[in-house]
Image (cartoon, rainbow, N blue to C red):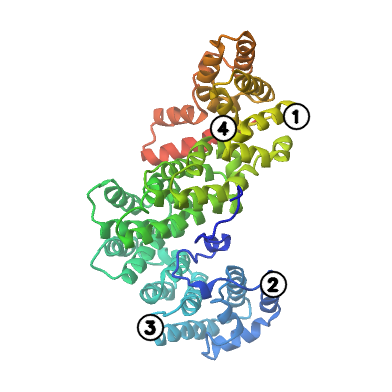
Amino acid sequence: MQVGQKQSMNIPNVSSWSNLSEISDASVEDIENRTEDEISVIKKTILDSAQSDFLTTILNGKLGSELISKSLGDSSVDVRSVALSYACASLSSDEVSESDEEKIFASFSKYFEQNTDTCCNRESDLLRAGLASLFCHFSGCLPEKDPRREATFHKIVLVMDALREEGCILVGRALAILVRSVSYEKASELCKLSMHSSLDCSKSIQQRRSAAAITSAIIKGLGQTCALRMTVVESLRNIFSDESVEAAQLACGFHLYSSVCMIVGRSFEPFMFEFSPMVFCAFSNANAEVRDSARIAQASIASSLHNNTITFITPALVRGLTHKSWQNKVRSLIFMGELSTRSPGFFKRSIPDIFSPLLECVFDTHPKVSASALSILRPICESVTNAELLGMLDLILLAIQYPQNMTEECLDKLMETTFVNSMDAPSLAIILPVILRGLRERAKELKQKAASTCGNICALVDDTRDLLPFISILLPELNKCEEHSHPDLRKCAVKAKESLLKGLDDQNSKGGKSSASYMYDALEASSVKIDPAVLTHVARVGGGMLTVAP
């Protein structure tokens, strides 16, 4: 098999993360098979339609029968987004009188009173969820003390009992708009009851998913200072830290975690990363419900990642890649494959940390692990920016896959290449396996080529901080070469060490102290009381900004 060749495996496509089809029970028939042009035509048709026609349909009590309503349940997230924006604009336009508002409210109320049966497929789930979201947005535009706002909140809470996973997530996000329409006491009590229901193993999965979505919506609606958020966090901590927890309880925890990630969003981000290693190591569980809930949780993580914090998922990935179970390795590799397409910039910053565990998976004895690793090796390597390395990427990949036969040829190519671009940490990580293999060979000639290449490559590094992750790996091998009996090899090793340690003082050569550590110490010394996970997260965000600053 060739490096980077796609395997015939159950690897979700990119759109599955954004449209939540991984979170729903979407089947093969639900996968989007329309072209971008066809979807664009539908969106244009929506935008070109007359708002008056849409309003007339709702005022006549025929909700769900016309184009806009049906588009709210479209399988394309883009179509649904355009339809919802168009519908919200229509219902909040100046053409809507107070008497019209009463009729619109009555039309929505009647629709949900008549449609109480459980959604049996994704299409009906999305349609009802879309109309419920529109009802929330419409009521959210009513005056703050209008009793219809609270009435809508309670109606939608009941509607969620009939929705599937995807519908609950979509409605939960919209329901947050109306949370402050009810008293804090009522919202708090409902949140606690819903949280307990979501973690109650005796409840059906449908009851638990709607309860989890209601819990998440209330936390989001009450804002970041909501103490209820920490109640949920502590409940999840108790579940995930208990090694003897029952499988059914663990599955409940993953479902609640998924819902909070998707609905609450960034205010839950510190805890999303805190619990993510448990998610990535749950696919070897003997219980099928745990594995399925972990899959949903992993998809929720992927959908909740943001560019400035996406690298914080690296520890969880490494944990999964280095786990003894092949199932966890495969799921981590699939996740990485998604990131290589969805957010290729992730690997520009994280390659130094994940490349070594990835290579271990390439040579794993389990065929599914090695096949998955090989399928994503090329797209990950293609994220480097050094033009010279990209030009010889095929040879580097062959040297990584077949070190016994291709290492020397790759080293020769590296030595004869004139590099005009500087090297950074990701570029160093890509060629590190080839250099290490050469340094560990018994033949003096190959060791010397590797040492010479190491010195030349390190000399191309502009920012000495990029060398820090590799010092502990390369320095012991160069020290061994420095003790070799042949003077030419010793000379190359000394030169390579000088390049490796250039511009670094004693503190930096030992790893130094990161910007995040300084930020953490400063925050910890302040009088602000903050959860340790939040403190760590804020320090990492601030430290990351300092690290990339010029």
Dot 1 or dot 4, earlier in sequence? 1
Q: Can see residue 547?
A: no
Q: Residue pushed farthest bottom? A: 60
Judging by the rendered image, the residue that carries numbered circle 2 is 40
User: Foreground: 286 or 119?
Assistant: 286
Instruction: Give the structural element (helix, strand or loop) at label 2.
Output: helix
Give the vertical position of 339 relative to 318 (above or below): below
Q: Are marks 1 and 3 in contact (CB under 8 Å)?
A: no
Residue ID for mark 3? 116
Tell me, for residue 433, which label it has, or none.
4
Residue 421 sits above or below residue 26 on the image:
above
Give me the C-alpha separation between circle 2 and circle 1.
47 Å
How far separated are the C-alphas under marks 2 and 3?
33 Å
Q: Earlier in the sequence, mark 2 or mark 3?
A: 2
Q: CA distance from mark 1 to mark 4?
A: 18 Å
Report, in whole angstroms, how far the alpha carbon at label 4 lies from the one at label 2: 46 Å
Disc nearer the start of the sequence (2/1):
2
Query: In the image, which is nearer the foreground, mark 2 or mark 1?
Result: 1
Disc 4 element? helix
